[in-house]
């Protein structure tokens, strides 16, 4: 039986492992950390269960698909429920917008802006739905081995029809005039680490997916998905080695031969790398001549997504808020431009996640868990080194903002646990180049055919699945990346030959 070695037990690594076991391969994972999940990690302290990275569950069918593919019932692994309202947006003038995928509630909220704006919003949904179908059918489900796969008349026609050359914000502005609605429908590009003012308009599909397919909650938090993937992988006979950083992807000529871990070779005919692509290219492939177009000099000049500064608060008091909420900065445009030009925002927009509002398993009885994410520049652009003093100052800036929220005035007196993840933490914990928490920036020149593909061209038997590879970042999208990488392996290999 052919052996596949997977580098990394992140979402895409585990999902690929399950698929490959089902396909009949022998699979072994090497993971640098002490437990699985990668960015979908967990910190546990004093009974608080903090999800580290992802929190918003979209496209639940992709979460379920990997279990179905393996022959299992996803309901035996995940308990998912629809959230409504799924997000509350707070504007600096004190107003708010509750976003719901339940049509009557949504319309009630929109009609505050008048019938013309409500119609504009509905027109946006219908137009973007059509573009989404095109993306799904022509680009998301397909990987590219050759230029012809993309540069053929059919694909080029579909790409042209996507009309993706303007920015997300400009595209939304055609449908709604009110600045608050424009922001509410374009800020979601930040979910993949790109500015709504410069990110391609195709990412306006994100709020459409939230609205039409819903935002879901997994009981026990996002880490349940990690635990479920790990459980399924082990049940199927897979092997995972934790605390086992891969030092090198071994090559014999132009072929992979396995990996080097703790100075020892581990042999396998096929290597699937889930460690983030830019890091892997720079550090795990030692021979520059084998890297094709992804030499170190190119990796350094590629464009990277934004980073994140996160406070994880365990509070010894109950606070009333929503599971997901966003608070916009006074000057949203300036705040976003700062992320692009490398300035640390002093009046940042931020996102709050409080699963303990609806899930008693997340925090001890009578206590609240709050996760506060502030988008900040990555370390390619940003000037901050995230020294202890800088972290302390920024932490206080964020806490000062939280205590200004109605009902949170005494928050500083009730902190039982306080943890931070800075860009630097993301860099060393998960090997994210330039601390870009969403990997390579999804601009047009780094998307679809132009994103690093799932089969590596210049080294045989080397494949990639993850955020910086095709199709891109986000838990459902890296699950799709795993599907594509495994299909590429099956095109080249039979498990028993
Ligand atoms: C703060 C934050 C918020 C997010 N919010 C959302 C959200 O709400 N919804 C959503 O869908 N997505 C969200 N995302 C994106 C999503 O988390 C990621 O796209 C996805 O989890 C990435 O999975 P992955 O498998 O590509 O990579 P990773 O999770 O990074 O997995 C790669 C694995 O490889 C391991 N590794 C690296 N180097 C080595 C080595 N040398 N040897 C062995 N192992 C190695 C790493 O430790 C890691 O476990 C968020 C991400 C972040 C950081």
Image (cartoon, helix red, strand yellow):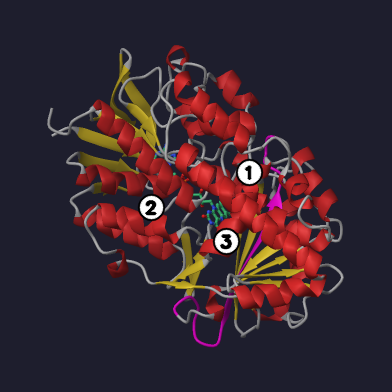
In the rendered image, residue 252 lying in the magenta stretch gets the answer no
Q: 48 or 495: which is nearer to us?
A: 495
Q: In the rendered structure, find residue 210 and report the number of the disc placed on it.
A: 3
Report whether residue 421 is seen. Answer: no
What x and y, as percent, mark residue 463? 36, 30
Q: Report the residue marked by disc 2.
A: 34
Q: In this view, does 369 lie above or below 207?
A: below
What x and y, as percent, mark residue 173? 79, 51
Q: Is residue 213 left or right of residue 414?
A: left
Q: Which of marks 1 and 2 is nearer the N terminus?
A: 2
Quadrant for residue 8, please give it. Answer: top left
In the rendered image, residue 373 lying in the magenta stretch gets the answer yes
Q: In the rendered structure, find residue 202 and report the number of the disc placed on it.
A: 1
Marks 1 & 3, CB-CB < 8 Å contact: no
Q: In this view, does 48 lie to the left or right of 252?
A: right
Q: Judge the density around disc 2: few (<14), some (14-19), many (≥20) Cα neighbours within 10 Å.
A: few
Q: How far apart are marks 2 and 3 (CA)?
A: 33 Å
Q: In the rendered structure, find residue 418 and report the number of the disc placed on it.
A: none
Q: Nearer the viewer, mark 2 or mark 3?
A: 3
């Amino acid at each position: 039986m052919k052996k596949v070695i997977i580098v990394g037990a992140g979402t895409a690594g585990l999902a690929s492992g399950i698929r490959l076991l089902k396909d009949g391969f022998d699979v072994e994972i090497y993971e640098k950390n002490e437990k699985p999940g990668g960015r979908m990690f967990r910190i546990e302290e004093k009974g608080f269960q903090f999800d580290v990275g992802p929190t918003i569950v979209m496209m639940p069918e992709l979460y379920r698909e990997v279990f179905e593919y393996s022959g299992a019932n996803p309901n035996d692994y995940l308990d998912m429920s629809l959230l409504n309202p799924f997000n509350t947006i707070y504007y600096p003038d004190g107003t708010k917008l509750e976003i719901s995928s339940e049509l009557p509630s949504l319309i009630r909220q929109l009609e505050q802006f008048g019938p013309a704006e409500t119609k504009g919003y509905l027109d946006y949904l219908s137009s973007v739905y059509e573009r989404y179908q095109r993306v799904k059918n022509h680009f998301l489900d397909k990987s590219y081995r050759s230029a012809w796969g993309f540069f053929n008349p059919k694909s080029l026609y579909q790409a042209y029809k996507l009309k993706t050359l303007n920015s997300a914000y400009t595209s939304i502005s055609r449908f709604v005039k009110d600045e608050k609605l424009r922001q509410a429908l374009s800020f979601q590009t930040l979910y993949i680490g790109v500015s709504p003012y410069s990110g391609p308009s195709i990412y306006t599909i994100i709020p459409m997916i939230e609205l039409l397919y819903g935002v879901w909650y997994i009981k026990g938090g996002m880490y349940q998905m990690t635990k479920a993937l790990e459980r399924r992988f082990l049940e199927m006979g897979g092997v995972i080695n934790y605390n086992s950083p891969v030092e090198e992807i071994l090559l014999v000529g132009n072929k992979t031969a396995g990996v080097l871990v703790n100075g020892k070779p581990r042999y396998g005919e096929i290597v699937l790398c889930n460690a983030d692509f830019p890091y892997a290219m720079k550090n795990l492939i030692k021979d520059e001549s084998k890297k094709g177009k992804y030499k170190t000099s190119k990796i350094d000049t590629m464009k990277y997504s934004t980073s994140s500064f996160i406070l994880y608060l365990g509070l010894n008091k109950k606070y009333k808020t929503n599971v997901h909420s966003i608070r916009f900065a006074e000057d949203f445009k300036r705040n976003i431009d700062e992320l692009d030009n490398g300035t640390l925002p002093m009046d940042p927009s931020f996102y709050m996640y409080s699963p303990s509002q609806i899930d008693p398993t997340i925090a001890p009885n009578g206590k609240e868990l709050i996760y506060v994410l502030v988008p900040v520049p990555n370390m390619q652009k940003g000037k901050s080194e995230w020294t202890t003093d800088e972290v302390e100052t920024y932490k206080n800036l964020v806490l000062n903002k939280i205590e200004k929220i109605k009902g949170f005035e005494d928050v500083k007196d009730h902190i039982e646990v306080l943890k931070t993840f800075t860009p630097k933490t993301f860099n060393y914990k998960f090997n994210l180049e330039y601390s870009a928490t969403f990997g390579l920036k999804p601009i047009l020149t780094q998307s679809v055919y132009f994103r690093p593909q799932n089969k590596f061209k210049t080294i045989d038997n080397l494949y990639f699945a993850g955020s910086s590879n095709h199709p891109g970042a986000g838990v459902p999208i890296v699950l799709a990346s795993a599907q594509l990488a495994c299909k590429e392996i099956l095109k080249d290999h039979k498990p028993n030959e």
